[in-house]
């Protein structure tokens, strides 16, 4: 799951981030370095030792899957190391790989990572850590079976350096019971969303249509609004323009709803929010994992109330787009001496219907996702089948928002959220937010274009 995670210091953010690790189901993410790399060069494996033991690094959520693979393939020797998966803002995999690069040994043959942005470092260098899976490691027919755009964050130039585990497209979650009780219609445009939010504030004070206090607010609202907060234009070049009209229109919309009182400035995982507002969420744009992780497990919303609608669009736009909040990846090491076994494990972990259909997150592999969505319906939790909204949103993640080494969540959480709570408006903070993004990008070696 990127999982995009919260990087804020408080324990609350750590809780939110750990929940993100459980999340996801989406698609169509942007190429993290579109046009940035030369044409693919032939991959030269190290000397292979068939039958040699696989060293697999995975987070606690994925370890049972690796153990299930091991049970189903008793002839494969596997040593499992449980690590953070880079959740909660950790950078363990890259740090360790740098040490292994210096010592010349120790690289895990297979590694899971909750942050799909990791491909930005794993694919770099004369001998990258990640092997290009499209060069004879995983069949094209298998790679073609992933959701449209799902492997785009793994793709640099003509090579695919990771395999997507799960996805997290944003949909419009809403409480169907409350909508029926209040006599409201589910909005289909952002303008209708704003109008309903203002109406709710007057007719049912205390009820909410969203929150701007989550670290992943940029992905939920601004990515969906096609705001060019970060568009990679070269190997280490990025365009940042929060003054774009498509950024200011979303900031203005949220400012009006914050002022009205129907959009909160708190995070949905705050104990106060859960206590005071969990039963007063009329609707909320959010990732596909909100259904089970947020509404069911955290808010304890009774079954038969929550439903999902497709992404919203601005009336001036020809099509609706959405953002993405999560989606982990699997890497196969370019240093592995048993690439065949490593590739088979990764293929099984990401495509096996027996395993993925019952996983906690929505699979990136289409066949497994179909089975997973059926399972969601079979739980009887949702008021309506969420599959149509999930499926429609899966192909609508806006491709103008690129994977980068820096975290939009960390920057938003440290720069924007405190100022919002001090009474500043999002519109007034766009310049400060832009400067923070530019400074972080520059510190990581990016050339920033306005």
Image: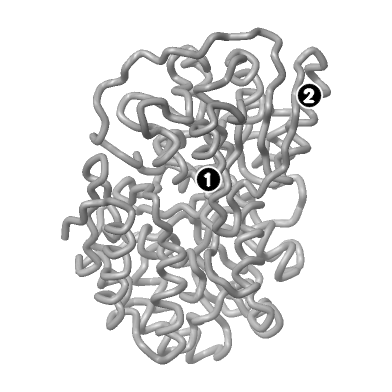
- Residue 319 visible in rendering: no
Residue in view at x 52 percent, y 90 percent: 203
Q: Position of residue 236 (x, y in %)?
A: 26, 45
Residue in view at x 55 percent, y 91 percent: 205
Which residue position is annotated with label 2?
70
Vertical position of residue 64 compared to residue 322: above or below = above
Q: Nearer the viewer, residue 198 or 296?
A: 296
Is 142 placed left or right of 195 in the picture? right
Vertical position of residue 247 compared to residue 230: above or below = below
Is 430 placed left or right of 161 in the picture? left
Residue in view at x 47 percent, y 54 percent: 310
Residue in view at x 58 percent, y 30 percent: 107
Task: State how far apart marks 2 and 1 are (Cα).
Answer: 27 Å
Q: Nearer the viewer, residue 318 or 242?
A: 242
Label 2–label 1 contact, CB within 8 A: no
Q: Which mark is residue 95?
A: 1
Q: Nearer the viewer, mark 2 or mark 1?
A: 1
Residue furthest left as drawn = 450
Vertical position of residue 327 compared to residue 298: above or below = above
Residue furthest front as drawn = 103
- Residue 400 visible in rendering: yes
Q: Position of residue 73 (x, y in %)?
A: 78, 17
Q: Position of residue 182 (x, y in %)?
A: 58, 80
Is 192 placed left or right of 141 in the picture? left
Q: Mark 2 or mark 1, which has the lower sequence index?
A: 2
Q: Quadrant of residue 225?
A: bottom left
> Which element is circle 1 on?
helix
Q: Position of residue 67 (x, y in %)?
A: 79, 31
């Amino acid at each position: 799951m990127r999982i995009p995670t919260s990087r804020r210091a408080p324990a609350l953010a750590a809780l939110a981030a750990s929940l993100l690790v459980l999340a996801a189901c989406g698609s169509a993410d942007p190429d993290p370095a579109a046009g940035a790399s030369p044409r693919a060069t032939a991959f030269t494996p190290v000397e292979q030792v068939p039958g040699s033991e696989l060293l697999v690094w995975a987070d606690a959520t994925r370890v049972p899957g690796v153990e299930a693979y091991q049970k189903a393939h008793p002839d494969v020797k596997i040593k499992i190391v449980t690590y953070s998966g880079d959740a909660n803002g950790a950078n363990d995999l890259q740090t360790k790989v740098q040490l292994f690069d210096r010592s010349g040994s120790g690289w895990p043959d297979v590694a899971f990572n909750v942050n799909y942005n990791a491909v930005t470092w794993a694919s770099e260098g004369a001998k990258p850590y990640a092997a290009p899976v499209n060069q004879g490691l995983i069949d094209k027919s298998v790679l073609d079976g992933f959701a449209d755009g799902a492997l785009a964050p793994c793709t640099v130039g003509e090579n695919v350096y990771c395999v997507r585990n799960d996805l997290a497209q944003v949909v419009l979650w809403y409480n169907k019971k409350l909508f029926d009780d209040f006599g409201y219609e589910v909005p289909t445009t952002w303008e209708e969303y704003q109008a309903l939010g203002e109406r709710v504030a007057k007719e049912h004070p205390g009820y909410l249509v969203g929150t701007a206090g989550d670290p992943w607010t940029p992905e939920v609202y601004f990515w969906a609004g096609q705001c060019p907060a970060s568009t990679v234009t070269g190997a280490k070049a990025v365009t940042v323009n929060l003054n774009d009209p498509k950024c200011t229109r979303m900031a203005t919309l949220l400012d009006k709803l914050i002022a009205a009182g129907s959009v909160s400035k708190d995070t949905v995982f705050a104990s106060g929010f859960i206590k005071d507002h969990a039963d007063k969420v009329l609707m909320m744009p959010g990732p596909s994992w909100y259904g089970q992780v947020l509404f069911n497990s955290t808010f304890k919303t009774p079954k038969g109330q929550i439903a999902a609608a497709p992404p919203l669009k601005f009336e001036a736009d020809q099509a609706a787009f959405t953002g993405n909040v999560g989606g982990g990846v699997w890497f196969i090491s370019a240093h592995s001496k048993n690439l065949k076994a490593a590739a088979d494990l990764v293929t099984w972990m990401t495509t096996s219907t027996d395993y993925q259909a019952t996983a906690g997150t929505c699979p990136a592999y289409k066949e497994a996702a179909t089975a997973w969505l059926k399972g969601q319906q079979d739980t009887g939790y949702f008021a309506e089948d969420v599959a149509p909204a999930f499926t429609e949103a899966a192909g609508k993640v806006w491709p103008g928002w690129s994977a980068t080494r820096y975290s939009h969540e960390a920057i938003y959480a440290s720069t924007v959220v405190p100022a919002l709570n001090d009474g500043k408006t999002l519109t007034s903070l766009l310049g400060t937010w832009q400067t923070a993004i530019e400074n972080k990008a520059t510190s990581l070696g990016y050339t920033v274009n306005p």
